[in-house]
Image (tube, grey):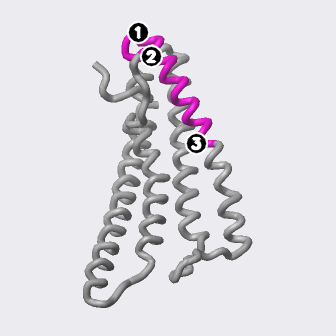
Amino acid sequence: MKNAILLLQRFNNGLAVLAGGLLLLSVAITLFDIIARQVGHSLGGTDELSGYAMAIATSWGMSYALTCLAHVRIDLVRSRCGSRLRAVFDAIALLSLTATAVVIAYRVWPVLEKSIKNQSTANTTLETPLWIPQSLWMAGWVWFAVTACVLCTALIYYAVKQDFPAINNAVGITDES
C-alpha cells in the first residue's frame, strides 16, 4: 500500500509541474500581450486563456495538494488527541473530501456534454470551442476523485491493521510534532 501511495505522489508531482508550466505559459502570454499593447498590437483573448489555465491548473493541482497532505484542516482538537482519535478525524476529513470530489467529478460531465452537444464556443473574439478547456478541467476533477478514492482505500487498509501512524503518514497532516 505504501508503494501505491508513493507512486501516486510521484505522479501527482509530475502533474503539478505540468500545471505550474501551464500557469507560467499563461503569465508569459499575458506579459507579451501587455508589451504588445504598448506598441499598438494585441493578441486578444489573454484573459480568456488565463481563465482556462487557472481552472485547469486548479482542478489538477488539488490531487497534488491531497497527496502532499496540504489540504486545509481546522486542527485545534485533532492536535490534542492520541493517534487513534487523530486517525478518526483524518478518516472523517478524507471521507468527506472524497465524497465531495466524487460528486463534483460526476456533475461536471453534464456541463461538458452540453457544450459538446450544442457545439458551444466562448463568447469572445477567440471563439474557443468550450469542450477543449472543459475536457481538461473535467479530467482534473476526475483524477482528484480517483486520487481521493485511492487514499480512502489506503485509509481503510491501515485502519483494519490498526496502523495509526501509517494513517497519519498517508492522509494526516504534515506539520505535526
Q: How many numbered dots are placed on residues in this image?
A: 3
Is 114 situated above or below 146?
A: below
Magenta stretch: helix, strand or loop mostly = helix
Of pointers 3 and 1, the one earlier in the residue sequence = 1
- Range of magenta residues: 77-102
Residue holding disc 1: 82
Q: Are marks 3 and 1 in contact (CB under 8 Å)?
A: no
Left/right of residue 106 with respect to residue 166 in the rendered view: right
Q: Which disc, if any, is residue 126?
A: none
Where residue 94 sits: x, y (%)? 52, 30
Where residue 124 sits: x, y (%)? 54, 78
Q: Are marks 2 and 3 in contact (CB under 8 Å)?
A: no
Say what amino acid the circle numbered 3 marks: Ala
Residue 6 in magenta stretch:
no
Residue holding disc 2: 86
Q: Are marks 2 and 1 in contact (CB under 8 Å)?
A: yes
Say what amino acid the circle numbered 1 marks: Gly
Residue holding disc 3: 101
- Residue at point 58% right, 64% down? 135
Real-space Cα distance between discs 3 and 1? 28 Å
- Residue at point 41% right, 39% down? 67
- Seen from the viewer's position, the closer of residues 90 and 153 is 90
Real-space Cα distance between discs 2 and 1? 6 Å
